[in-house]
Image (tube, helix red, strand yellow):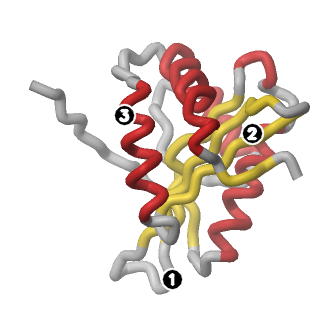
Amino acid sequence: MPIRMWTEQDIKVVFSLLQELNEALNEDQDIRMNDIVKHYNEMTKSKDIYENYVYEEDGAVIGFLSLIHYRSVYHKKGTTLINELVVLKGSRNKGIGGELLKYGIERAKEKGMDEIEVGVMKKNTKAIEFYKEHGITEEYYLLGMEFKDK
């Protein structure tokens, strides 16, 4: 299977994929390599909560999936959140995103969660359409507030 857990050697390409995501969304997120390294180190300490995967084709990483598994009092079993799902620009529309999504859903079931969620920016109509085509429905609104560094 071309999907595997990410390793420290994947950080550079994940950085590039996240920059592509930033560009595709017309966002100005300040994505820094040292922040990704820091997150990698922190996330690997809590493997029961954080799972990050890459999609490989012919030895090259062309996709990334980040999952967060969490419990809440309201849900009996728990929730898996798709934190990021991104495919290299030149490799999109080939079913790779769908394979990553399907893998994430299977991981959520294996972890005993009772739902999977994804937050998508309202203006990202392609992503919304993608998720709906793959059975993710609009159940409620996710509201957010970003804190700006001072």
Q: Which residue is mark 1?
A: 77
Looking at the rendered structure, the kind of residue marked 3 is Asp
Secondary structure category for the residue under label 3: helix
Local packing at callout 3 (Cα closer than 10 Å; few below 14, some 14-19, many 20+) is few
**In the image, which is nearer the foreground, mark 3 or mark 1?**
3
Residue drawn at x 67%, y 57% as measured from the top left = 104
- Asked if labels 3 and 2 touch by Cβ distance under 8 angstroms, the answer is no
Measured in 3D between alpha carbons, the distance from the residue under mark 2 to the one under mark 3, in whole angstroms, is 25 Å
Q: Which residue is mark 3?
A: 35
Q: Is residue 99 left or right of residue 21?
A: right
**In the image, which is nearer the foreground, mark 2 or mark 3?**
3
Local packing at callout 2 (Cα closer than 10 Å; few below 14, some 14-19, many 20+) is many
- Image coordinates of residue 9 in percent, x first then y, are 62, 37
Secondary structure category for the residue under label 1: loop
Residue drawn at x 52%, y 14% as measured from the top left = 23
Q: Which mark is residue 97?
A: 2
Figure quadrant of the C terminus: top left
Q: Quadrant of residue 12?
A: top right
Local packing at callout 1 (Cα closer than 10 Å; few below 14, some 14-19, many 20+) is some
